[in-house]
Image (spheres, helix red, strand yellow):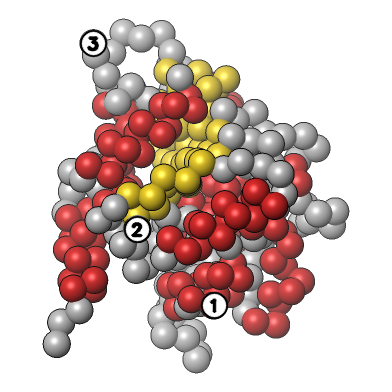
């Protein structure tokens, strides 16, 4: 007997992935690895004559696993560019492309490389954008990301509150110059995500396995990297069966306990993928949330 929730999720995923990739206006490298690249999309709203536009840094999802790269969010990058934003679509190293022993598929993420790359990309972006996308107003930078990318967006905004002893290059001495973060169905609380089996235990794999959870979570779990002092909004579908809304709700509750208010928009009748689907109403909500922080 079919499961309506699973059928809806499959249909939403098919719709989101049906859009053809959109080529960027420019690409720049922030390191030597083939995945150390950022694609830039110039703002396309109106007649294109605007002198400057807010910069949206986009971090793709895919459970930090190698088969999922930035290509699947290029339609979202184009959607945001057509809404008047300058967009930087960041690639980063993910898990191996090959299944590992005792794993159901490719392992999620690399420790510490996934985090090394996000930190390096964020640090390099001002210089890269100034050259590749002069319309980008770096004073109005918003970071957004979907699913695993939502986790990385929250982490990028929390680097100044990382504990002492964080790997080299991760910790910032002061808050990053961001207008805010819009996290889309983020894997934002590793304890809850693990308990719910999100993405086949991807968060645990990202940290290198169960043996490293206690040691590494304080440097990687957004739910313990609070408060950040950075304006943060979370958008999540109530019908999400990939990353259940309980994960976002737990993160928001953790922020409240830390004395910080995080906005939470729960969308009725919406699952995991409409948030990155330019053909879905939920994607327009995402653009509105970004605009509220950026403009």
Quadrant for the C terminus in the image: top left
Q: Percent position (x, y) of residue 269? A: 25, 56
Q: Which element type, helix, strand or loop, lies under badge 1?
A: helix
Question: What is the CA distance from the residue labelled 2 to the residue labelled 1?
Answer: 18 Å
- Residue 271 figure quarter: bottom left
Q: Can you see residue 122? A: no
> Nearest the camera: 250 or 272?
250
Q: Label 2: which residue?
A: 238
**SS at circle 2:** loop
Estimate the spatial distance between the alpha carbons at disc 2 and disc 3, rounded to whole Å.
37 Å
Are there few (<14), some (14-19), or many (20+) residues within 10 Å of tag 1?
few
x 65%, y 82%: residue: 210
Residue drawn at the location 42% of the way across and 32% of the way down: 290
Q: Which mark is residue 195?
A: 1
> Can you give x and y, in whole percent of width and height, for residue 98 in the image?
43, 78
Q: Are marks 2 and 1 in contact (CB under 8 Å)?
A: no
Q: Residue at x 43, y 13 (%)?
A: 52
For disc 3, the marked residue is 47
On residue 134, which mark appears?
A: none
Most foreground residue, 256 or 137: 256
Seen in the image, is 2 located left or right of residue 217?
Answer: left
Q: Quadrant of residue 212?
A: bottom right
Q: Which residue sits furthest bottom?
A: 102
Nearer the observer: mark 1 or 3; the answer is 1
Count of numbered labels shown in the rendering:
3
Residue 245 on image: x %, y %: 43, 61
Query: Which of the two residues, 155 or 126, is positioned nearer the viewer here?
Result: 155
Residue 202 point in image, percent of width and height = 50, 72
Mark 2, residues whose alpha carbon is within 10 Å: few (<14), some, or many (≥20)? some
Q: Residue at x 47, y 46 (%)?
A: 264
């Amino acid at each position: 007997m079919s499961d309506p929730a699973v059928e809806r999720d499959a249909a939403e995923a098919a719709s989101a992935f049906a859009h053809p990739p959109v080529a960027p206006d420019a690409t720049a490298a922030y390191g030597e690895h083939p995945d150390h690249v950022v694609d830039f999309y110039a703002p396309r709203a109106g007649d294109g004559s605007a002198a400057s536009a807010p910069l949206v840094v986009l971090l793709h999802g895919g459970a930090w696993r190698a088969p999922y790269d930035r290509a699947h969010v290029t339609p979202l990058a184009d959607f945001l560019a057509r809404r008047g934003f300058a967009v930087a679509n960041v690639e980063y190293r993910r898990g191996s492309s090959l299944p590992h022993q005792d794993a159901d598929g490719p392992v999620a993420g690399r420790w510490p490389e996934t985090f090394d790359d996000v930190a390096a990309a964020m640090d390099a972006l001002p210089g890269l954008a100034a050259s590749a996308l002069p319309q980008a107003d770096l004073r109005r930078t918003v970071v957004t990301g979907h699913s695993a990318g939502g986790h990385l967006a929250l982490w990028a905004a929390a680097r100044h509150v990382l504990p002492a002893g964080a790997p080299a290059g991760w910790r910032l001495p002061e808050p990053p110059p961001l207008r805010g973060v819009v996290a889309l169905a983020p894997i934002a609380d590793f304890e809850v995500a693990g308990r719910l089996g999100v993405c086949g235990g991807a968060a645990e794999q990202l940290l290198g396995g169960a043996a490293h959870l206690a040691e590494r979570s304080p440097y990687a779990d957004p739910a313990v990297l609070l408060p950040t002092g950075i304006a943060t909004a979370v958008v999540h579908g109530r019908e999400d069966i990939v990353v259940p809304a309980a994960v976002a709700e737990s993160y928001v509750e953790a922020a409240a306990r830390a004395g910080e208010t995080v906005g939470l928009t729960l969308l009725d009748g919406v699952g995991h993928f409409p948030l990155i689907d330019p053909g879905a109403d939920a994607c327009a909500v995402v653009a509105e949330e970004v605009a509220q922080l950026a403009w």
